[in-house]
Amino acid sequence: ALTSYVREKFSKLTNYFEHIIEIDVTLSVEQTKNKEDRQTVEVTIWANGAVLRACESSFDMYASVDLVLDKIERQIIKYKEKLKDIPRRTAHHKREREATHTVLSLSEKTSDASEPKIIRTKKFALKPMFADEAAMQLDLLGQDFVVFSNAQTSEVNVVYRRNDGNIGLIEPHF
């Protein structure tokens, strides 16, 4: 019943945005101090070179699905509005690259607390985009950084949120 509920709800997203490539929904029950926020739903949507993510928790899994759906719908609307502001560009390079996104964290179990341990590896396709499109992704995802393939240079670049609120761009030089 829950699976069909999730499929029914998320299939309606194509009404907002028809270029959805893939939707990944993860349902989990977490052991938290607050019993009201144990039912968690995480969703990632790949669409037209954009990646949208949202996560919501509540006392009920169905409520969490509804909350995360509302959040992701707002992100899609915001993304579509920003797309209207950016002149339509075509990427010169159509190839996609596989990248590895590594999350580092200090392990509580290691004896040397100064050495970070790789606790999670994430793989995703890098689609060519311009730096301003990557900056838009940064705002949409609410992330600290976004790794992307620069459509102008064909190199892997990173945009990140600076402490002063502006956005920085990292371009490698080999």
Image (cartoon, rainbow, N blue to C red):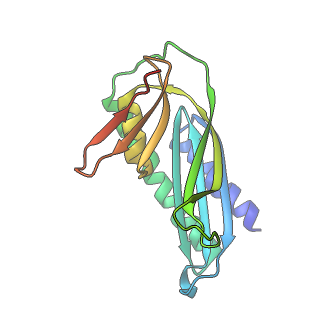
Q: Is residue 113 above or below residue 54?
A: below
Q: Nearer the viewer, residue 19 or 27?
A: 27
**How many labels were placed on the picture?**
0
Residue 168 screen position, x and y as percent: 31, 38
Identify whether 166 is placed above or below 96. Answer: below
Residue shown at 33% from the left, 28% from the top: 86
User: Residue visible at 45% across and 49% down?
Assistant: 141
Residue farthest to the front, as pictured: 112
Q: Quadrant of the N terminus?
A: bottom right
Q: Quadrant of residue 96?
A: top right
Where does the image place residue 129, in percent across and percent down from the top left? 46, 26
Is 100 situated left or right of 49 in this image? right
The furthest residue to the left: 164
168 left or right of 96? left
Residue 106 point in image, percent of width and height: 55, 64
> Which residue lies at the image location 62% right of the left edge and 71% below the top edge?
111
- The answer to which of 15 and 109 lies nearer the viewer is 109
What percent of the width, then of the height, locates residue 109?
Answer: 65, 72
Give the quadrant of residue 138: top left
Q: Nearer the viewer, residue 14 or 170?
A: 170
